[in-house]
Amino acid sequence: MPEVVLEQISKTYQGARGVRHQALTGIDFTVPSGEFAALLGPSGCGKSTTLRIVAGLERADGGDLRIGGRSVTRVPAAERGLAMVFQNYALFPHLSVAENILFGLRSRRVPRAERNARLAEAARQLRLTEQLDRRPAQLSGGQRQRVALGRALVSGAELVLMDEPLSNLDARLRADMRTELRELQQRLGLTVLYVTHDQVEAMTMADRVIVMREGGIDQIAAPEELYARPASVRVASFIGSPPMNLLDVRRDGTWLVLDGAEGDGDRVRIEAAGLLKGLPDELPEELVLGVRPEDLVPGPGELTLPAVRIRDELLGADRLIAFRVGTRTVQVRVRADEHRPGGDRLGARHTACHLFDRRTGARLDARRLVGATG
């Protein structure tokens, strides 16, 4: 299985009136052989451009791209030995399922016996055997997606690129296809680079997630690490549903003062000696305090926030309760059958709290600044 390595990849587009737009800047990451890696980020962050450069559909302006140890930066797409699955499936409406799956093999003049063997195996793996004579219009969205996957599988490519392949499916079918895709990738040992804006897809399927922002990379980590230790405010606010509660605070000795309150009499002061202990001497004055909704509990804790309950929402097995902290709103996640917390305080363990430099957005911990970004 091929390893994919991107080193200092950059890409610039010519915009209106001659203005040049920097789409990618210094993209560096490696997808080891047999790994499922997800490129995650909002629209316009550069994830699809990165995928198209790996596929050979776009040419990078700078940097080096290697697949299986071979530099392919200037190699045509057809010679890169990979397969691609598109968002819109790209199926021929006038061809049957079998003909769509075999289209690439016919173009490459693969012998009929080998074509038929590959078709039978792909149809079995994707549960399409009964649909081989149908046209795409006669299939459901999930079946059409499996046909597009089948075309990638019969190619024999061990590197598969996927550009938001599940975005056209309904929520239930997306959940089913996530499971099928992951099982298929693991069973066949494929190397997969998967583009998505949906954090649920990235967090449930990928071995590692590459979080992108404005043509750069914010963080590369396993899903568990992304959730537990986001490297920046942007990652903290993007990963998690609902996202992490983030409060702008100022350091005042061993206290944190919540910004945004009106008048000195309304200032919210949070005792934080235990949280600040061991942090670098050069700790900035303006910080962002983050706590995930499930890490807040009613009553005092190692870190205590004064709070007033304002509303709650039932989400099936869970309940989201909104509290006012100063002039800010924070959310608490509890089980639906638990007592609804009231009171005037919320608590959290120090280990569940996150501190970020407000100016750079970088995470702070006792050893260093992590993932500093401007």
Image (spheres, rainbow, N blue to C red):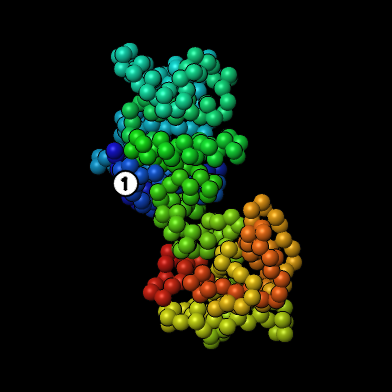
Residue found at x 38% / y 31%: 83
Looking at the rendering, which quadrant does residue 139 occupy? Answer: top right
The front one of 24 and 239 is 239
Residue found at x 53% / y 61%: 236
How many numbered tags mark residues here? 1
Looking at the image, residue 71 lies above or below residue 112 = below
In this picture, residue 254 sits left or right of residue 222:
right
User: Where residue 102 sits: x, y (%)?
Assistant: 40, 19
Q: Residues within 10 Å of mark 1 (few under 14, many from 20)?
A: some
User: Where residue 346 sits: x, y (%)?
Assistant: 63, 73
Residue found at x 52% / y 64%: 233
Residue ID for mark 1: 32
| Residue farthest to the right, as pictured | 310
User: Where residue 17 sits: x, y (%)?
Assistant: 55, 44
Q: For the residue labelled by badge 1, is the local secondary structure a helix, a strand or a loop? A: loop
Q: Is residue 73 visible?
A: no
User: Where residue 371 sits: x, y (%)?
Assistant: 43, 64
The front one of 216 and 220 is 220
Looking at the image, residue 64 lies above or below residue 74 = below
Looking at the image, residue 6 lies above or below residue 369 = above
Residue type at the position of mark 1 = Pro
| Residue farthest to the bottom, as pictured | 253
Q: Is residue 308 visible?
A: yes
The front one of 87 and 17 is 87
